[in-house]
Image (cartoon, coloured by chain):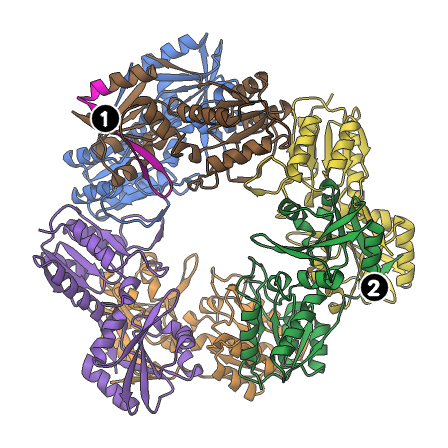
Chain colours: A orange, B purple, C green, D blue, E brown, F yellow
């Protein structure tokens, strides 16, 4: 049986976890109960919240791999007490659950990254190009949509969600889509300085940047932070399953509980 | 006629602009074309974006007062070139438009703050209490709603908007509402450590904090960053009109251009 | 039954834990399994090492109070993995053992501090004076020993240990003894600038400071870091026993395993 | 017609503007009114003061290239208000005048630098050598003057100025002259550690360093900060005129207004 | 006989040396050969250069009090080797010469400060007012000169120096003179924001600030850094002579060796 | 006769003094009285304390080479006054004694380092391997001891000292000894992560790390900070003697004055 240590070493290497794009979060192993113990089952979830941790424990996972890490690179006055972060850590330790996280190294990975995985999911046969900057990376796909309506219909068909948001000016013809998962709308200006595109597809828009699409004369489409970042984890799950035949895997799908009032 | 300098001094004092709660943004005067010139008309808008600046210039405003500042307290390699920030600054200067901003000092002001103004707008006759922490402040209102549905109906009636979001567990009876405008959902845990409430009403939720309402066993209601922050500016507009009788004012309502796909 | 929260609040207040003399270590609660649970038994030990934690768990303690904290105030790239610190934390959490620590606030406390407690233990009836600097504090006792030999005989009689070390010049007559527990020999020069004494009694000497007694024409006596810091914990144990009658206490005496070859 | 963007790109590349010798000033584009607009005329001046800006506007320049930048690399609490810096920026923007600056990259440039240009102006036929350190660079010229008087007569003849200052011991025979324009006298000690010279020719001497020539047993000659830095700009003006045939240029000579009382 | 320690303590208290206006230089004792030794003679000089140190040693001074300190508050990679600073320190120690310095605390002292002493020297009977800012302080004198020529004639008569420099616009009638010794011309803008004056009298002008007088529509007169800072030291010398009757004093007048070519 | 400058250059190069392993101490020249003077005699001592400095002066040394430097890389508010550091510097300068120090570059040097020199002294014929980390380095020797007793007997025979301390669990058979001189016991965990060994031999143990040997299931043997660091200096002394035939050398053996009470 493969040990936790072997799996962590495989992930560190495969995801090139040390190249973290100056992430403020800490990538790699977060909690390792016993690195010499064998691993029978691995869960995958976007976040290391209580719900995901409890489910992973219930599913008898030895390890939970998440996209969003528990720890920041620098922590001041860190105590394990009564706050939410501490409760998650204590819950995991009591459940014998180790946790490994890959944030930016998973977003930008060339094979299983959130960007490339979402691009493949949405526009399977299209030509894609990875654009690299110092601290980030995104993907541009060649597509063919005659107008925004057609583009949005394609999106809805693929991701089957209400609440897609569109910011800025609508294009007549859509030939290039930039894909940058998560809260990347703050980087729209930098991305546009690197390459041209008709639509910028991302997860989440913050108010402070909601003027940018219009002022940059482009269009941003947000499909939700959570939904934009599921495909990288699923790709990684497949890679682990292929490389560690004796380990079982499960995907733990726990979106935020949110109700929108029409 | 009152000069720009006199108005800036009045605002600095009335808003106690030096007490900025360790804001990363720069509060107070942002651009003063000529502080000795007289001021005939003042515009008020949430953001100093191109649309608001152009409208203020078209309305013949000499000064635009915004909630969100143009400048951060510390700026690295700042140039006035081709980026969005520079374009706004150049647009204002060419239009002879001075700009003054009040961010956290306006959010937390005891008389015209965004928090207290929204509380008064929504729950006019209720008893309110200001809760102060080192770097922030919020308001708690005593209310009487028999359940969440009644509470949400009241909200919708008042703010007349689609898209209100509800996170976390729904309360049976609502007696205390915390009001903290803008992107304050990241401070939910700290607020709850300071006082109890049944609902936390704010502007915007970020994904990273979307698990908190549920894990803290409370409920968060988001009415939108922009809509949560209009009432402080309107209160401040009234104060200026009262104190400078010869100056005309206008409110520039420019919400972000956003379309939600059902 | 008193809750963990009540005990932590009592300790934070009694030890004035926020005044930490610019400690690099983090004082106060380190690990709280569940702050609302009741506490039946508290262990006290100098260090939160594996031996002390295991013994506290075996003794059914709910809380371990140590002198040396687990956490520093600032931590970089902290992970709970395979290192000694992580193993201690995981061991404590799995054993349902909360940990509270008081470092400099315990060393310098006026009633139960390590300095004053050791002074009382060694020179019971003598007059003592607390000398305060910005970042530290020590105690000076009026004593009467006709020479160093008599002084050392008295020490040995009291602390019953081999291996007491004497640095610097030997005094003829000893009238004032400074007491500063732990690794304080690095502060000898600062202490001597604040007041006069014939002997400086402390725990541990580092090589870099071993020249100081001689160059400052004074004498330093080291009784061992561990042995110098037991009396503060014992005084604090008594205070807790008096204030929480329903709680049992136990002292966990785990000195470092060290063998000296003659 | 060439655009502003093309000229900025040419300058950035030709001056290798990113290699800024750890300058505290910000090099390169300072203000670009519209980088896509065409440029008909470029002014060159040592400083971006009000007089130079007004003159450039009056001369219908689209761009002013200065040696001393407007912006520092890091700015705290920067506002565009009533101070001199703001007034210059507002004056330029209202006059549709873009500004580009090259400080240390112009001082030390191998072809058009202030150092090499002054060396060529003063000692045309002499052999010159560029000496490079980590954060600065200067030029040493082989010359032949039989004494200081002859050397100073040559200087006066060339630069036609009163007020040249001489510090330190006077040499009998002058064979090597170091040339380092501007306020470089503070670097005399470092320069002398790198190579030998008989005279150090620079712009300006600060009191704190006025003892150095004597204590280092060398001689410093100051011709004035302004006058030492005109030749680099003039060389650069020629380079631009050669590369952009359709653009007119003008040199804006605005020395500080200073009267010396005999 | 008074000891060095007593004199240092007197100076520290009289000059309130801890209030150093955020000076980058280190104020107070620089080198104390033996603080318990008696002091027979004290020299006073503006700078701790080799010439002043040698003269003080030759004059049998035990202590040299200077305006400009030897040490900065923070020093990186400080070695006592072959550089000018080291040579001065070694020269002083070998000559048994202690050094004490007072920089900003001497500039701004209310009784013996450089500012107030120069004001008294130049405009004896005039009314003076001290203007305090957070990090600096200057003096404003009420005077009566019918024009600039009369003012400059008065200056020349008093200080008997060639080379006084005048920057900016000349006033018709001079009623208020600001006095701020040393290299304070960089603070002209801040000073003018605090109070009005017709002339700003200081020591030294740097090129970067030489545009300010003109742009601020005021006038700056520079009498030389060295000559502006002699009077504070002379006042302090008198205070020491009065308080330590058994100590001899001498003033060491060592201006920089500078020749100006007409 | 070789000059001080030549010797410093030789040492800087031979010890590769710029590669200082991020030392907090300042390596290389500390005090150079006159770098152009000739050097007749060099003393070597572990520390630059008063006793060693006085002895070097008495022995007519021109230069003292120590392992522990005088200066840190960064010094705040450094004055040459009444403290121990100042007294050492003044004592050296008055005695015309220059000082050169090599801390980590001497510990880790491949030919004359403290680690390799101690290894050669203790286990002459054994195979040694240098293990390098980013900020430190240590040596591992292949040895053959049938148990701890035999190993300790060998040590005592070689270093002839009482007071060797043994921490942690005792091994049955000893095949690999790590050697890391000085206060390196704090790095035990990092060293063990790099390679295996049965015993870790070092100088000094601090209380905070005294639990580590036991918790890491290894054994640490401390022979004293001073005694662990003599052999590197002696090796270096030999290298200098070989390279500068005309210079005399002497070893100044000044251990700390310490008495242990049985």
Residue at the image position 40 percent from the left and 77 percent from the top:
B192
Seen in the picture, residue E97 relative to D82 is either above or below; the reply is above
Q: Are marks 2 and 1 in contact (CB under 8 Å)?
A: no
Marks 2/1: CA distance?
82 Å
Circle 2 SS class? loop
Q: Is residue C12 magenta?
A: no
Quarter assignment of residue F10: top right
Q: Which residues are magenta?
A: E129-151
Coordinates of residue A96 in the picture (x, y in percent) = 61, 82
Coordinates of residue F100 in the picture (x, y in percent) = 69, 35
Q: Quadrant of the C terminus of chain D?
A: top left
Circle 1 SS class? strand
Q: How many marks?
A: 2
On screen, residue E117 versus residue A101, left or right, reads left
On screen, residue D184 versus residue A149, left or right, reads right
Q: Report which residue position mark 2 lands on.
A: C160
Q: Report which residue position mark 1 lands on.
A: E143
Question: Dot 2, crowdedness within 10 Å: few (<14), some or many (≥20)?
Answer: few
Q: Answer whether residue E192 is visible to the viewer in this image.
A: yes
Seen in the picture, residue D22 relative to D206 is either above or below; the reply is below
């Amino acid at each position: 049986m493969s040990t936790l240590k072997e799996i962590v070493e495989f992930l560190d290497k495969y995801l090139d976890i040390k190249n973290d794009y100056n992430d403020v979060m800490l990538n790699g192993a977060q909690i390792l109960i016993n690195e010499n113990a064998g691993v029978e089952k691995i869960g995958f979830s976007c976040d290391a919240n209580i719900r995901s941790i409890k489910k992973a424990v219930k599913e008898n996972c030895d390890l939970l791999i998440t996209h969003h890490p528990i720890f920041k690179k620098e922590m001041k006055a860190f105590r394990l007490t009564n706050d939410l972060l501490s409760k998650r850590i204590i819950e995991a330790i009591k459940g014998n659950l180790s946790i490994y996280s890959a944030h930016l190294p998973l977003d930008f990975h060339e094979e299983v990254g959130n960007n490339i995985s979402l691009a493949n999911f949405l526009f399977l046969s299209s030509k894609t190009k990875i654009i690299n900057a110092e601290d980030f990376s995104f993907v541009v796909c060649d597509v063919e949509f005659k107008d925004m309506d057609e583009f949005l219909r394609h999106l809805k068909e693929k991701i089957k969600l209400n609440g897609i948001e569109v910011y800025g000016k609508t294009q007549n013809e859509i030939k290039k889509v930039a894909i940058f998962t998560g809260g990347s709308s703050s980087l729209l200006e930098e991305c546009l300085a690197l390459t041209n595109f008709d639509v910028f597809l991302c997860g989440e828009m913050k108010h402070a940047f909601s003027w940018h699409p219009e002022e940059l004369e482009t269009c941003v489409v947000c499909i939700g932070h959570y939904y934009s970042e599921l495909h990288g984890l699923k790709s990684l799950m497949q890679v682990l399953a292929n490389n560690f035949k004796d380990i079982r895997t499960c995907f733990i799908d726990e979106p935020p509980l949110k109700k929108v009032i029409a």
